[in-house]
């Protein structure tokens, strides 16, 4: 019968203060798995961490040893690690997946003059360690104790050296799941630490005092006691919705899909326009009003990673549909077309506010126009818009929409005839959505109202410029061309070097115009004809 040992080191008043709380759970675990429990309480080394190399001699007496740091607690239902880790393997958790540790290997290799040519990038935390008698030689203590994360640098150097001389198909280390060594560096996963079998408080001293750590451990043990035997916890997802209004609207399908994926979990949204996500029944806050909850390990998701990110280096938002870009950023996937349709809610209050603002104007018998201002590459000349509106309004009333503020960039200032109405800066976001929902046709450049219209059944005529129309028009009925048209001669995007070898010195805002607008914009007559025919044919 195998002789099993659960071993820990406890030296010094601080360690003893923590151990007075943690050792009870460690000892109970040792009894549960049929192992002896031993505490090393003397330090004959440069630091207590090096005392775990006593494993070398203890393996003369024991067949297998599970080493556990004293600053951890073990949940009552933790499986037997001796059953999980094969006898011939060393059981360890690779913390390099979550924290930068490359420098530790290199500085330790230099200190010990040990050359490792093919380090695999793994760096194991030694707070939870499963070993067998056959691993004894690895625990021979070096004559010089060079500290790099205490003894971890040297230990990982030994592991790296051993792995270098083994068949890659037969690694020395059996990698333990993080749930068997839940550390502070894992607080980015969104998973509550209590979900793990072993909570390891290494690193907490950077955030709190000894009294703080002791208090936290007591609370965690009490929580486990209260939650036994089910131990069910929610994952915490924080969605940071970024970009302009249109970008944030385009994040809605991915957020809606994510809600289905994490139906039982704790999801929170930060956005500049909380109104957009009312229908999702998810706690939603304005960016400036969100307050982080203490001790909540949020998994943070950005809906629109910028040019400084890896996401952008693979595919930029300019070169794909924003709904797809948000989905890739949030969920590492693209949805089937039917999942890409934007959903927005219009309330009775929105309609009442709109009716009051319209003051009798029939929005169901007009064309809504958004003459948006933004990048130079999609801000059309005021004169072009003015001539267009003047001609259209002779056949059908026009309703101008838009908001002039720092986030939306605003709209062109235009004159309207008496049969039309100007709602610029006269609507809330809710009544703006209501207006778009009731109008038979929207005419716009690449701007937020196009994406608002994606939630409804009206016609869209888009004048694209810095993005391809198929990357702007919203998905409805499984296609971007459902009740949608795009009118243009050329795209400003076409004048940009889009090859992957292109070098951009400094930041730019979208594609830039290299020719006059006459080279890009459709004729006024063509747009008027399309608008009038579309309105008449839809009646």
Image (tube, rainbow, N blue to C red):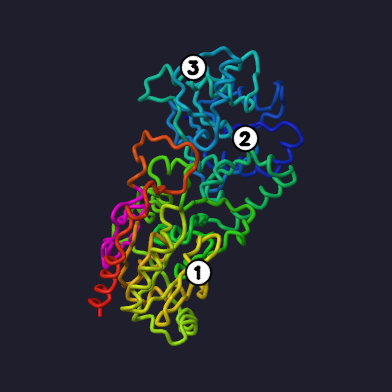
**Nearer the N terminus, badge 1 or badge 3?**
3
Q: Residue 317, percent across and down?
A: 40, 49
Q: How much space separates mark 2 and mark 1, taking CA atoms?
A: 49 Å
Which one is closest to the eye, mark 2 or mark 3? Answer: 3
Q: Residue 388, percent across and down?
A: 36, 68
Location of mark 1 (residue): 275
Location of mark 2 (residue): 69
| Residue 494 in the image: above or below residue 488 | above
Query: Are discs 1 and 3 less than 8 Å apart at CB?
Result: no
- Residue 340 is at least partly visible in this image: no
Determine the residue located farthest toward the left in the rendered image. 537
Q: How much space separates mark 1 and mark 3, taking CA atoms?
A: 56 Å
Would residue 483 appear left or right of 3 to someone viewing this image? left
Determine the residue located farthest toward the right in the rendered image. 13
- Residue 303 is at least partly visible in this image: yes
| Residue 475 in the image: above or below residue 434 | above
Magenta span covers which residues? 465-493
| Badge number at residue 116 | 3
Q: Residue 224, percent across and down?
A: 59, 53
The structure residue drawn at horizontal position 50% and vertical position 32%, both measured from the top left corner, is 92
Residue placed most toward the observer, 502 or 253: 502
Residue placed most toward the observer, 97 or 225: 97
Mark 2 closeness class: few <14, some 14–19, many ≥20 residues within 10 Å: many
| SS majority, magenta | loop
Viewport quadrant of the C terminus: bottom left
């Amino acid at each position: 019968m195998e002789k099993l040992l659960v071993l820990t080191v406890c030296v010094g008043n601080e360690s003893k203060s923590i151990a007075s709380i943690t050792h009870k759970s460690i000892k109970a675990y040792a009894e549960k798995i049929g192992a002896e429990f031993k505490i090393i309480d003397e330090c004959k080394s440069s630091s207590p961490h090096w005392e775990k190399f006593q494993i070398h001699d203890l393996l003369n007496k024991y067949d297998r040893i599970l080493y556990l740091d004293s600053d951890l607690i073990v949940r009552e239902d933790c499986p037997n690690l001796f059953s999980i880790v094969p006898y011939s393997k060393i059981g360890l958790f690779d913390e390099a997946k979550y924290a930068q540790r490359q420098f530790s290997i290199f500085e330790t290799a230099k200190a010990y003059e040990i050359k490792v040519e093919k380090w695999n990038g793994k760096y194991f935390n030694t707070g939870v360690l499963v070993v067998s008698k056959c691993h004894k030689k690895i625990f021979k203590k070096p004559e010089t104790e060079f500290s790099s994360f205490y003894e971890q640098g040297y230990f990982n150097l030994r592991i790296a050296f051993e792995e270098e001389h083994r068949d890659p198909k037969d690694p020395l280390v059996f990698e333990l799941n993080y749930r068997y060594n839940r550390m502070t560096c894992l607080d980015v996963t969104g998973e509550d630490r209590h979900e793990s079998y072993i909570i390891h408080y290494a690193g907490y001293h950077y955030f709190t005092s000894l009294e703080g750590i002791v208090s936290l451990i007591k609370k965690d043990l009490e929580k486990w006691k209260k939650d036994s035997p089910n131990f069910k916890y929610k994952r915490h997802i924080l969605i940071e919705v970024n970009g302009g209004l249109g970008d944030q609207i385009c994040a809605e399908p991915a957020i809606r899909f994510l809600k289905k994926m994490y139906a039982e979990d704790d999801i929170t949204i930060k956005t500049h326009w909380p109104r957009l996500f009312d229908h999702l029944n998810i706690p939603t806050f304005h960016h400036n009003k969100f307050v982080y909850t203490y001790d909540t390990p949020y998994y943070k998701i950005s809906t629109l990673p910028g040019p400084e990110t890896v996401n952008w280096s693979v595919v930029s938002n300019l070169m794909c549909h924003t709904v797809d870009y948000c989905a890739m950023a949030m969920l590492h996937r693209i949805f089937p077309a039917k999942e890409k349709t934007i959903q927005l809610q219009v309330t009775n209050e929105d309609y009442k506010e709109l009716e009051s603002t319209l003051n009798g104007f029939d929005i169901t018998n007009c064309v809504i126009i958004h003459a948006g201002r933004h990048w130079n590459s999609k801000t059309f000349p005021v004169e072009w818009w003015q001539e267009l509106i003047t001609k259209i309004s002779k056949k059908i009333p026009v309703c101008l929409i838009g908001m002039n503020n720092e986030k939306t960039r605003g709209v062109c200032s235009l004159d309207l005839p008496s049969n039309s109405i100007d709602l610029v800066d006269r609507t809330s976001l809710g009544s703006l959505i209501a207006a778009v929902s009731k109008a038979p046709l929207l005419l716009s450049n690449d701007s937020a109202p196009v994406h608002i219209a994606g939630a409804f059944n009206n016609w869209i005529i888009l004048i694209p410029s810095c993005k391809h129309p198929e990357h702007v028009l919203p998905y409805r009925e499984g296609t971007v061309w459902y009740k949608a048209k795009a009118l243009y001669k050329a795209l400003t995007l076409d004048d940009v070097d889009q090859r992957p070898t292109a070098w951009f010195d400094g930041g730019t805002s979208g594609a830039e115009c290299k020719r006059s607008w006459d080279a890009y914009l459709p004729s006024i007559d063509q747009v008027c004809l399309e608008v009038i025919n579309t309105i008449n044919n839809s009646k």
